[in-house]
Image: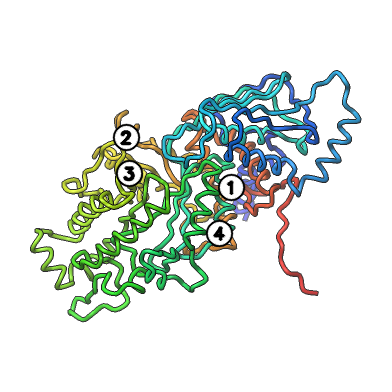
Amino acid sequence: MWLFIVGVIFGQQEFAESWPDPYFRSKGAVWPEPQYVATVGEPMDVKLETFTFISTVGQCEIIDKAISRYRKRLYGEKQLNESKNAQQKYVKEKREDEKILSNLTIAVNEGCSNRFPQIGMDESYKLNVTSSGAILRANEVWGALRGMESFVQLFFDNNTKIRKVLIQDYPRFLHRGVLLDTARHYLSVGVIKANIELMAQNKFNTFHWHIVDIESFPYRSEAVPELIKGAYTPRHVYTLTQIKDIINYARLRGIRVLPEFDTPGHMKSWGVGVKDLLTKCYHSNGSIYRNFENLLDPTNSNTWDVLSALFREVFEVFPENYVHLGGDEAEFWFTECWISNPTIIQFMKIYGLKDGSSIQAWYFSKFIPLLRSLKYGKGKKFLVWQEAVSGATSTLNDTTSGNLIAQIWKNIKDIEYVTQMGYYAILSACWYLDSITSTADWKLYYSCDPQDFNGSVEQKHRVIGGEAALWGEWVDESNVISRLWPRASAVAERLWSSIETKSIEKAWPRLYEMQCRMVAQGYPVQPAEGPGYCEYEYKIQVPLYE
């Protein structure tokens, strides 16, 4: 009994010490951590009633709308009244010889651009906040957006004070993404936009839209209208108008929208509306394996007609230079479908294909050139899941200038093999955020580095970033924001900040503030750690029946 009691006491002590101080939270710290930041004196006071943003860019939609957003952020509904009261009290106590920050001047070297963000865009910026004033300089509008976000995060104490700093900042990786799955559970346009906004606040730059899968096909194609029969209901769909609206919403925040249409597997919902698109499957005794079809039929000419029509439309709707072609887990259906289908067996003999993997390699070797021959397809580049390149070097060897990027999802060690083959790569293996635990798992995400593998300098240069993935089997409208944030914030800092920024202890006070910053705006983000509080708790709106 005594040993048990001692064990419990010391166990509780160890457990308690693992929790951070709930009262220890940074004030006016930037997330993700900038590449270089220096404090230049005591914080300065701000009077929001007279504070202004000054753009030297001229009329520019991206900058002008960003200014409008950040004004609303500073005067958020949850903080407005208390902030005004604090401001009024502060003005009465203010000495005349003390300076008040009155504006932020925004300068962009290359002027306004209403283009769409693309990989490799310049997101660098310099931000100076001193007693003499505040100025933000960037080469492109995308850097100005990142700098404005950092500037707003410097405010604290009900937005009456701001830190005086010098910041020089740029992202470590080109590709910093979040994957949302709208096939397993439909997500409304509103909640997709909410997540895009939070992505911008965490300096992500790529929304990977896993829009269709086995369970549903919510993309309302005008080129192949029959495909929409694979949606859950006629209401659970995305029209091209809605999709273009989401793309523009993301553009204004410097975020690319990367669509994924997974092939040649995970395609059951495609076959609901387009008959004979999928390969018929068979049991080992030769009887038909019904309701198992998930692989396309590469021997059917109609398959290629459908793919051509759909992707011609996708290229026109999505201005993004890259499109994700899937390619994962097709092996789940190799034996019962491709390898057991009499037509496919004959097809394999004709082309000298020995197994399912060789069929998939043959498929991509034909599919990708076809896509580049389509209208709007010239110059397109593609992403695939790692299975599409593993073991297929003889037919799928497009490694030039990132023409084909492999997304690593099985194990971080696989990135060594893929980059050794010559492919560019992004990592998701350690950032599957749909999996939850009862611990502070943000620390695991924070500690995972895309370049932490045995490989040459050249190999590590081929790793261009990563993505936090939120698969939708157990995620819907009710929990997508809380499941994702602020856990994805840990991924954001790993992908943006210096490789030397790795201390969990130093990160926690800033992440705690970032969590509360999102909560104060009305987003239902979950606690990153254990017991604690934010000044403005999330107010859930539910019907209360008396």
Q: Nearer the viewer, residue 403 or 415?
A: 403
Quadrant, the C terminus: bottom right
Q: Which residue is mark 3?
A: 405
Q: Is residue 356 left or right of residue 144?
A: left
**Mark pair 4, 2: CA separation:** 42 Å
**Mark pair 2, 3: CA separation:** 19 Å
Q: Which residue is mark 2?
A: 454
Q: Which residue is mark 1?
A: 197
View extreme (right): residue: 92
Q: Is residue 204 left or right of residue 312?
A: right
Q: Residue at x 44, y 50 (%)?
A: 208
Q: Residues within 10 Å of mark 4 (few under 14, many from 20)?
A: some
User: In terms of secondary structure, where does tag 3 sit?
Assistant: strand
User: In terms of secondary structure, where does tag 1 sit?
Assistant: helix
Residue type (three-letter) at the residue carrying disc 4: Val
Q: Check the image and report above or below for 220 versus 368.
A: below
